[in-house]
Amino acid sequence: MRTLPFILRLSWRDSRASRRRLLLFSSAIVLGIAALVAIGSLGANLDRAVDGQAKGLLGADLIVTSRNPFGAEMLAHAGAQASAVAREQSFSSMVVFPDAGGATRLVNVRALEGRFPFFGELTTEPETAPARLREGTPVAIVEETLLRQFEVPVGGRLRLGSAEFLVAGALRKLPGESTAFSATAAPRILIPAAALAATGLTERSVLVRHRLMLELPPGRTPEAVARSFRERFRADGLGFDTVAERRRSLGRALDNIEAYLGLVGFVALILGAIGVASAIYAHVRQKLTTVAVLRCLGASAGQSFAVYLVQGVALGLAGALAGAALGVGLQMALPRLLADVVPFPVEFFVAWPAVARGIGAGVILCLLFTLLPLLAVRRVPPLSALRSALAEAEDVRPDPWRLVVAGLIVVAIAGLAAWQSGGWREGLGFTAALAGALGILWLLARVTSWLARRAVPRGAPYVIRQGIANLHRPNNRTVLLLVSLGLGCALMLTLFLARSTLLRELASAGAGTRPNLLLFDIQDDQREALARALVGAGAPLLVEAPIVTMRLAAVRGRPVEELFRGTPRGRPDEAEAARDGRRGGEGARRPASWILRREYRTTFRESLGGAERLVAGEFTPRASPGTEVVPISVEEGLMRDLGAALGDELTWDVQGVTVRSRITSVRAVEWRRFEPNFFVVFPAGVLEEAPKFHVMAVRTTDAGHAARVQRAVVAACPNVSAIDLALVLETVDSVLSRVGFVVEFMAAFTVLTGLVVLVGAVLTGRLQRVRETVLLRTLGASAAQLRRIQLVEYAVLGCLAAVVGGALALGGNALVAHFAFRIPPAFPIPVLAVGIVAVAGATVAVGFLANRGIVRQPPLEVLREES
Amino acid sequence: MNGETMLKVERLTRSYDVAGGRRLTVLQEVSFSLAAGASLAIVGPSGSGKTTLLGLCAGLDRPSSGEVELAGTAIGELGEDARARVRNAHVGFVFQNFQLVPTLTALENVLVPVELRGEGGAKAEAEARALLARVGLEERHEHYPVQLSGGEQQRVALARAFINRPRILFCDEPTGNLDGATAHAMTQLIFGLNHERGTTLVLVTHDLELARRCGRILRLRGGAVVADGLA
C-alpha cells in the first residue's frame, strides 16, 4: 500500500502524452452507457408516472365490460355498489363529413352517459366541450387528428348513421388511452348517449361493446365489487378492469419495452468496451519498454500492472460519467418522442439508480475487457529494456488468467443482461445470441483478412495493393472494425428489413384480384341492397360470410367454468388437465384463459375458403337439421392452443342455445389474406336461424374508388362499417414507424459506437501509420497516392462491414419473419443498398478525418509530434 | 567496504531453444567475483554474450545453470518480484538507449526508483535536484526526454541510477549512442559519481578507452571468458 501513491502518480504522469487519445477511446463506451442510462431513467420516470396517475389511468375505480346491454338488475347492482355510475356504448361505424365532400372514415363511436371520467381529465379543445356533451344535445367530440385530416373545424358537421352532429371540440386525451394508436387505427368520436338512438346504428349492430364505469365509495375495493358482479352475473361473461390491473399490465408493457431497448443499448456498450480494450491493447504495446524499464528499476509485476490498470479504470470511469451525462440529456428528449405513445404525461427527473446502474455496467465491462490486454503487462521481462526485440515480440505463452478474465466477461455480460432484461433466461439467451453474432462476424473478418492476403492480383495498381494489404498486415484492425461496424449495421438493417417484410406482406394481402375492402356489421335484410350498391359503385361482391357469435361452454364434456374452478389465475387446474390429457405432454397443456373465455365469431358454409387448406380429417359441407353433435372444422393454431385433437367434443353457447360439436377436420388458414377467415367453421344447415350478421369483401382499384364505394355503402346502409386495406397499412406503418423510430434511434447507437471504435482504431494505429506514411513520402509518394491508399483501405473495410452486417441482417430478418411473423422474409435491395453505401461512406469519412494531417505535414514534423 | 564481495558469478550458463530442436548456448560456464567498490568492464565482439551476462548479473534474466550472488543475495532462486526488490534496493542502471520514461520530466524520471519504494517527498526531490545539478542539468528539470539531446538524456539516466544510492551500477554501452565529446563527458561523470559514492561498477562496452578506466576487464568470446585481468 505504500506504493499506491506512486502507482496513482505514475499512472497520471504516464498518461500525459496520450490523455486526449485515451479520452477519445473512452468515448467508445459513452454511447452505450448513455443509452442504458436514458432508457433506465426513462423507465423510472414512466414507473413514477404510472404510479402517480393512479386512478387517472382508468378514469374510474372499476370498469365492467360486456358484449350485451346491461340489464336492469345489473344496473341496480352497480348503483348500489357505487357512489357514481357512468355508461358507455362503443362500436365501429362510418362517419360522414358532409362539409368535406361527403368523405367517410371508419371510426370508434363512444356514446357516453354520466360524468365520466371520474378521475383524470378528458382533455379537449375547447375545454368546454365535455360540458356541452353532457347536456345531451347532438354534439360530438372528435379525435383531433381526424378533424385535421378532413379539415373540419370545431362547429362543423358530421353524420353518424342517420343523425347529424355538431363538432363541439377536438379530443386530445382520454384517461388511460394512448393517442398514437387510436388516432390512426380507429379515431374516437364521443357523443351523448341520449343522441345515440337517433343514429339508428345500435339497433342493427351486434358489435357493440358496453362499459359501466363505477366510482366507489371509500372502503369499497374494486376487487370486491368485481367479485360481487362475477358471482351474481356469472353467465353474462362480464369483463373487469381495475386501476391495479391496468397499472400491472401497463407496468409490464413498459418493463418489456425498457428491457428490450436496454438490451439494444447494452449491445452498443459491449461493442464500445471491445473498442476500448482494443485501444488499450495498442496503448499497452507502446508502453512495453517503459514497463521493462520500471521493472529494471525495481517495480514489481503487480505495480507495473497496477499503473496501467488505474489508467484502464479511469478510462472506463471517464467514459461512464460522460455517458451518464449524455444519457440524462437524451432522457429529456425521449418522453417527447413517446408523447403520443404513452397514455399519460411523463414528468422528467433524473433516476439516480439508473444512472448508477449505467455507470456500474460501463465501469465493470470496461474494466474486464481492458484486463485482457493489460494482463500482458505482468509478463513484460525486464530484460527487454536491454533488448528491444523482446518488447516487440508478442508473448505467446499460455496465461491461465486470460481464461479467468474471459470467463468473468461472459458471466458479467450474462449477469448484466439478466439484470437489464429482468430474467436469467433472457440474459443467457442474449449472451448466446450475441456470442453467435460476434462469432460469425469474427469468422467472416478472419476470412476477409485471409482473402486480402491471398486474393489481390499482383498486377493491381500499387495503391490498391497497399490499401488492401493494410487489412492483413500486423496490428491490423480488420477483425475489430468488421465486428463492431458489422454488428451495428446488422442491427440497424434487421430493423429496417423486418419493417419492410411486414409492410410488403400486408400490402400483398390485397394484391392482384384479392379483396382490399372489408364491409362488416351487415344485417340479413341489408344484404341484397348492399350488393346492389356495391355493383353500382363498380365493386362487385367477391366474398361473403355469415357470422354467428358464440362462446365455448365445455371442452370434451367439461364445462369451461369447471376448468377454471380452484385456479387462482383463472387457468384450468394442471392436475385436472394432466388427468384428462390423453395425449401425454400435449394433453397436459393448459389452454390460456382467453382461449376459453373469448367470443368466437364463427361462420358456416359448404366448402373451404380460398385462404384455407385441409390438414387433417374430413370437411363436412352440410349437416342435416337436428344433428345432435355437429361436425365442425377448427383452425390448426386454435387446436394447439386448446390442446384438442380430432374427434374431441366442443360444446358452444350460441347466444343462449347450447350446441354440441365434434372436431372432424383441421384447417390451415392463411390469415394474412385480407378477407374474412375463421377459427371455427360449422357446416351449412345448422346455424342458419341463429342471430347473425354478414361480412362482405370487395376489391377497389384506387383510393378514389375506395372512397366512392364507402360513400355508396354508408348511403345504402349507414350502420355498415368498412375497413380499407390501405387504412390498415397506414395504421401499421404509423405504429411501426413510431415504435421503429425509438428502436432505430437506439440501434443507431451501435452504429455510432462502431464509428467511434473506428476512430479509436485509426488513432491507435496512427503511430505505425505515420512511420509508414513518412517512409513512403520520403521515398517519393505523393499526397494524392497516400490518400488513395487510405481510401481503398477504408472503402474496403466499410463495404465489407456493411456487406457482412447486411448478410447478418438478412439472416436476422429471415428468423424474425419465420418465427415472429410466420411469413416469408422480404429482400428489399434498395434498403440494403442504402445501408451498405451509408456505412461504407461513413467509414471512409471517419477514417479520413481521423487520419487527416498525416499526409499534408512534412515528414519530420509529424515524426516529432508523434514520438 | 573493501574486501566484501558485491557480485559473485559461478559457472553461469545461458542457452536458448532455437528452431530445429537445437539449443543455442550464448554464455558458457562464466565465473568471476567482484569486490565492493571495484569496477569491471565486460568487453568482446558483438554476439559474445556481454549483454546476456550483464542481464543475468543484474537479475533481469534467469540463468540456465549456475549462480549469481548480488550484494550477498543469491538471486537465482528468487522470484521475479523478489529480484525486482533486490534491484530497487541495491542496483542502478544505465542503458545504451537511455530508456527514460518518455511521458515523465527529467526530475520525475530521476525520482521513479525512490517513489517506487514509497519514499517520495521533499527530501527525495531535493536529492534528485542535487543529482541533476551534479550531472549539469539543473535548468532542465521540467523537460521531457524528447526535449533533451542524447547526452542530456543519458545524464538524466545516470542521475536516476544514483538516486537510490545503489551499491552496484550496471551500465550497458553507456556511451554507445553518444558522439566523442559527449561520450567523454559521460565517462567522466560515471567514474566521478562512482568514485564519490563508492559504488561497484559493471559496464559492458565496445569502447576500449572506457574499459581501460575500469580496474578490471573481462573479455568474452563466443559466450566464454577468454581473458580476465587488470586494465
Image (cartoon, coloured by chain):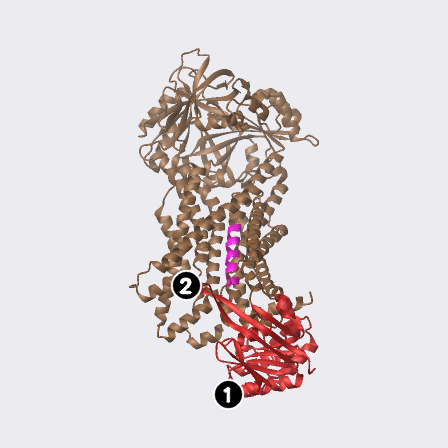
Chain colours: A brown, B red
What residue is shown at x 46% (from left), y 74% (from top)?
Answer: A863
Which residue type does callout 2 highlight? Arg
The verdict on residue A54 being magenta is: no
Which residue type does callout 1 highlight? Gly
Question: Subunit of mark 1?
Answer: B
Vertical order, A373 against A194 (above or below): below
Question: Subunit of mark 2?
Answer: A
Vertical order, A242 against B192 (above or below): above
Cα distance between the residues tagged 2 and 1: 41 Å
Residue ID for mark 1: B180
Q: Residues within 10 Å of mark 2 (few under 14, many from 20)?
A: few
In this rendering, the count of numbered labels is: 2
- Which corner quadrant holds the N terminus of chain A? bottom right
The single residue placed furthest to the left in the displayed view is A459
Image spot of residue A251 (x, y percent): 59, 40
Front residue of A120/A353: it is A353
Front residue of A690/B117: it is B117
- Magenta residues (range): A265-281
Q: Does the rendering let one see residue A162?
A: no
Q: Which mark is residue A449?
A: none
Image spot of residue A623 (x, y percent): 40, 14
The verdict on residue A271 being magenta is: yes
CB of mark 2 within 8 Å of CB of mark 1?
no
Query: Image quadrant of residue A233?
Result: top right
Residue ID for mark 2: A473
